[in-house]
C-alpha cells in the first residue's frame, strides 16, 4: 500500500462529517472521491466544501499550503461505489448512525474492496464487533471516530475490531497524523469509546448536582467554562494532577482518600426523568431559545471560539 500524498481517499456519505473529512484530507494533498447514495447530496457537498474552504482562507485558518481552488481540484463526486473506491488507500464511511444501514454498506464494500485498502467507520458509538463481524476483510476494518467540528477539534478515536490487524491501526494512526488530526488508540473496544464515556461521566454528575438542587445549570456551565475547561484545552486530567502536587504519586498520597470518598457518593446513573429534562431545557432556553435561529447563532459562536483556540494552540 502506498502512502504517498497523491494517493486517494474515498468518502462514503457526503453529509456533515463526510464533508469535514473531505476538507481535512484534501488540505493534506490527498485526492478525495466523495460518494453518496443521493447524487444531489454530492453536488451540494461539493458546493458547501468550496464555501467552507473559502471561509477558512478568509479567516486565516486554511490548513496546508494549497489554495481553496487547488484543494477543490483534488475533490470529486462519484455516484458509483465501485468507481469511488477504486485504487483508494483508505475508505472513510460517513453514513447515518444506523447499524443496519452501515452493515449493509460494509457488506457491499466487502465485495468490492481489495486486500490492501483500509475500511474506516466514522461511527460515534457503534462497536466494531457489531459493525464489522463476518466481513471477509474484517482485518482491514477500524473505527476512526472524529469530533465535530473536525477541522478545529482534531481528536480521532481509533477503535479496532478484535480481528483488526495491528498494521491497520498503525497505518490509520499515521494517516491521521499526516493530515493534521490527533489520533488516539483504544487497545480494545468499549461502549462509548473514551471521549463519550468521559463526557457522559461529566453530564451525569452535572445532572445530579442540578436535579438535587445543589447548583443551577448556568453555574454548572460556568464550572466548566471558567474553571475546569480553561486548562482542559491544554492539559488532561493526568497532567493536571501531576502538576497540582509534586507529581502523580504525591497527588494520590494527598488526595486519593478524598477522591474515593467523593466518588463513592456519586450513586447510580441519573434516570433523566421527564420533569428534570423539562426544567433543565427551560433553564437553557432562557439563555439560548431552542429555535434554529438562536441555536445556529450560538453554533456559529462556538466555531469562531474554537477556531481562535485552534490558532492559539498552533502557535504554542
Ligand atoms: P449526515 O446525516 O449529515 O450525513 C449522512 C450522509 O450519508 C447523507 O449525505 C446521506 O445521503 C448519506 N447516505 C445515506 N445512506 C447512504 C448510503 N447507503 N450510501 C452512501 N451514502 C448514504 O450524518 P453525519 O452527521 O455526517 O454523520 C455521519 C457519521 O458520522 C455517523 O455515523 C455519525 O455518528 C458520525 N459522527 C457524527 C458527528 C456529528 O457531530 N454529526 C460527530 C462524529 C461522528
Image (cartoon, rainbow, N blue to C red):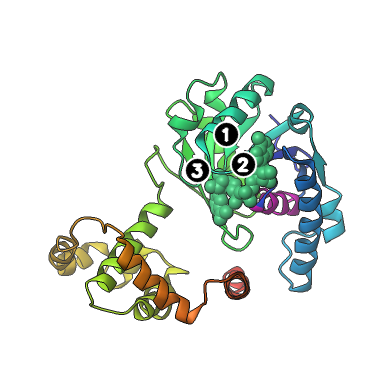
Q: Quadrant of residue 281?
A: bottom left
Image spot of residue 195 (x, y percent): 43, 54
Image spot of residue 13 (x, y percent): 67, 42
- Magenta stretch: includes residue 21: yes
In three-dimensional space, the C-alpha distance between marks 2 and 3, rounded to whole angstroms, equals 18 Å
* Label at residue 95: 2
Q: Dot 3 corresponds to which residue?
A: 158
Residue range highlighted in magenta: 16-28
Q: Dot 1 corresponds to which residue?
A: 101
- Choose the circle earlier in sequence order: 2 or 3: 2
| Circle 1 crowding by C-alpha within 10 Å: few under 14, some 14–19, many from 20 | few
User: In terms of secondary structure, what is the magenta stretch mainly?
Assistant: helix
Q: Is residue 162 visible?
A: yes
Q: Are marks 2 and 1 in contact (CB under 8 Å)?
A: yes
Q: Secondary structure at mark 2?
A: loop
| Circle 3 crowding by C-alpha within 10 Å: few under 14, some 14–19, many from 20 | many
Q: Quadrant of residue 277?
A: bottom left
- Choose the circle earlier in sequence order: 1 or 3: 1
Left or right side of 96 for 246: left
Q: Is mark 2 within 8 Å of ligand 1?
A: yes
- Choose the circle earlier in sequence order: 2 or 1: 2
Amino acid at each position: 500500500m502506498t502512502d504517498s500524498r497523491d494517493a486517494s481517499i474515498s468518502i462514503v456519505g457526503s453529509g456533515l462529517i463526510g464533508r469535514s473529512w473531505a476538507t481535512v484530507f484534501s488540505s493534506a494533498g490527498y485526492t478525495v472521491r466523495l460518494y453518496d447514495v443521493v447524487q444531489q447530496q454530492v453536488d451540494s457537498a461539493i458546493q458547501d466544501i468550496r464555501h467552507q474552504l473559502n471561509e477558512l482562507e478568509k479567516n486565516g485558518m486554511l490548513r496546508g499550503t494549497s489554495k481553496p481552488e487547488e484543494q477543490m481540484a483534488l475533490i470529486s463526486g462519484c455516484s458509483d461505489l465501485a468507481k469511488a473506491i477504486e485504487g483508494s488507500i483508505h475508505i472513510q464511511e460517513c453514513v447515518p448512525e444506523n447499524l443496519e444501514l452501515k452493515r449493509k454498506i460494509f457488506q457491499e464494500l466487502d465485495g468490492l474492496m481489495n486486500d490492501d485498502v483500509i475500511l474506516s467507520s466514522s461511527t460515534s458509538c457503534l462497536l466494531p464487533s457489531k459493525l464489522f463481524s463476518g466481513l471477509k476483510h474484517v482485518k482491514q476494518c477500524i473505527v476512526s471516530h472524529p469530533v465535530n467540528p473536525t477541522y478545529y477539534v482534531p481528536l480521532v478515536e481509533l477503535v479496532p475490531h478484535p480481528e483488526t490487524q495491528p498494521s491497520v491501526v498503525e497505518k490509520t494512526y499515521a494517516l491521521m497524523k499526516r493530515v493534521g488530526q490527533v489520533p488516539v488508540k483504544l487497545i480494545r473496544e468499549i461502549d462509548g469509546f473514551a471521549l463519550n464515556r468521559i463526557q457522559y461521566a461529566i453530564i451525569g454528575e452535572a445532572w445530579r448536582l442540578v436535579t438535587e438542587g445543589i447548583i443551577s445549570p448556568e453555574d454548572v456551565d460556568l464550572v466548566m467554562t471558567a474553571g475546569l475547561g480553561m486548562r482542559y484545552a491544554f492539559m488532561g486530567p493526568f497532567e493536571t494532577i501531576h502538576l497540582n502536587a509534586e507529581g502523580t504519586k504525591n497527588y494520590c498520597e494527598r488526595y486519593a482518600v478524598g477522591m474515593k470518598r467523593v466518588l463513592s457518593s456519586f450513586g447510580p446513573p441519573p434516570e433523566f426523568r421527564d420533569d428534570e429534562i423539562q426544567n433543565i431545557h427551560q433553564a437553557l432556553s432562557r439563555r439560548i431559545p431552542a429555535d434554529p435561529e438562536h441555536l445556529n447563532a450560538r453554533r456559529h459562536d462556538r466555531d469562531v471560539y474554537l477556531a481562535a483556540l485552534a490558532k492559539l494552540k498552533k502557535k504554542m
